[in-house]
Image (tube, grey):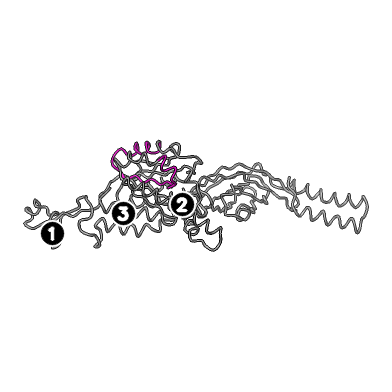
Amino acid sequence: MALTGRTALLAALGALVVGLLLPSWTGIGLVTGAVLIGVIVDLVLAAPVRTLRLGRGGDTAVRLGEPASVELTVTNPSGRLLRGRVRDAWAPSAWRPGTDRANSRHTLDVPGGERRRAITLLTPTRRGDHHAQKVTIRSLGPLGLAGRQGSHLLPWTVRALPPFTSRKHLPSRLARLRELDGRTSLLTRGQGTEFDSLREYLPGDDVRSIDWRASARRNTVAVRTWRPERDRHILIVLDTGRTSAGRVGDAPRLDAALDAALLLAALATRAGDRVDLLAHDTRKRISVAGTSPGEILPAFTNAMALLEPALHETDMRSLVSTSLKMAPHRSLVVLLTGLDAAPVEDGLRPLLPLLTKRHEVVIASVADPQLDVMAAGRGTLEAVYGAAAAEQTRADRRATADRLSRHGVTVLDAPPAQIAPALADAYLALKAAGRL
């Protein structure tokens, strides 16, 4: 049973009547009896709640920050009108702050034998699966004084996928890829190492590109044209250990790494390369391999949605071993990790020769732009100390990057907004240089 505000208002008015007109036990009994009769009438005439049939439909996946619509269907099998107040409860992270009350509550009038639908709008604020909680329905009587109330368990899950905000950089990188691939007039002759086609010799062409056999058959001088290699293997490795949990701005470093991995995967797929994904800390968290080009981005985003940082140090030996198993032949291995001196010196750097012996390696790290702000601070003693600490941190990161570069590794250190395009540019540069 549930009482409404109307019942409280009626009781307050009755108290005034008793106090002003009938200040006696008789007056109290009359007013109390009237309120009780009204409540009993509402309870008797209200539609039953437990026999209602509920159903769900709508979105099951949405990119983080975008709205999702979940449909709630209420069927009233009884012969009485359902004057319903519905609360569709979800976890707090399924709503933008301050919007849960407006979006989770609905008013439905369902005649007997009919059904009605309500739309619950969700806007997840965290990646991962968001599960529906109980659906609570209050069925009010015709007087609006009281009603029946009950809850139904109606499972539904909406998965919040990585937002892929860096996709705005994809068109410009695809244009550069077309230049490298010889599909535009901006291609510099001779780029790439994979044979593309033959054409007639032009003044200025490299004589080493002349195909003498083809020239003999054609009775004209023919030269070979080249393009960047296709069907190369790229392994993207996400370090999900302790350093990936550090927050840069309002999000952990891992989120920026996921965004960079998605941009690289989209670009490499368009280039005709094969892309696999590995996430690892003390053990393998996710692995996506052997996916067809058209399914790579959906497979990556679906796997990344449930990925969370682990609050312990990454087992670099296990990470490198798993990477070598997933990339048995020459590949481009892209490791998204941190540049903190201690973990790199003790864990990663001794194992780098195992990777660089066989593979081209890129190490990308998400830098904190707040360090630049702190390094420029002056004016107070606190600001000067902060600037010194920030400058020392930046110097340590540069020194770590230099030591890694001596192993033939391409090292990128960029803030969250720039790490994705920087990684895409590094991939294009390696492709143009024929190093893949």
Left or right of residue 392: residue 154: right
Position of residue 3 in the picture relative to residue 73 (left or right): right
| Three-letter residue code for mark 3 | Leu
Residue 34 colored magenta?
no
Quote the CA–CA distance across marks 3 and 2: 30 Å
For badge 2, the amino acid type reads Thr
What's under tag 1, amino acid-wise?
Answer: Glu
In this view, the mark in front (3 or 2) = 2
Q: Position of residue 79 (x, y in %)?
A: 67, 46
Instruction: From the image, tell me which residue sits under label 3.
Output: 428
- Of residue 359 and residue 90, the one placed in the foreground of this image is 359
For the N terminus, the quadrant is top right
Callout 3: SS: helix
Name which quarter of the figure residue 302 lies in.
top left
Residue of label 1: 200
Q: Can you tell which of label 3 and label 1 is closer to the viewer?
A: 3
Q: Report x, y in % for residue 367.
A: 44, 53
Seen from the viewer's position, the closer of residues 211 and 161 is: 211
Question: Can residue 102 be seen at all in this image of the molecule?
Answer: yes
Residue placed under numbered mark 2 in the picture: 393
| Vertical side of 369 occupied by 112: above or below | above
Residue 140 coordinates in the image, percent (x, y):
71, 50
Q: Secondary structure at mark 1?
A: strand
Viewer-closest of 13 and 301: 301
- Whether residue 119 is visible: no
First-in-chain label (3 vs 1) = 1
Q: Which residues are magenta?
A: 318-347
Residue in the image at 31% along x and 59% along y: 175
- Disc on the earlier residue, 1 or 2: 1
Q: Earlier in the sequence, mark 3 or mark 2?
A: 2
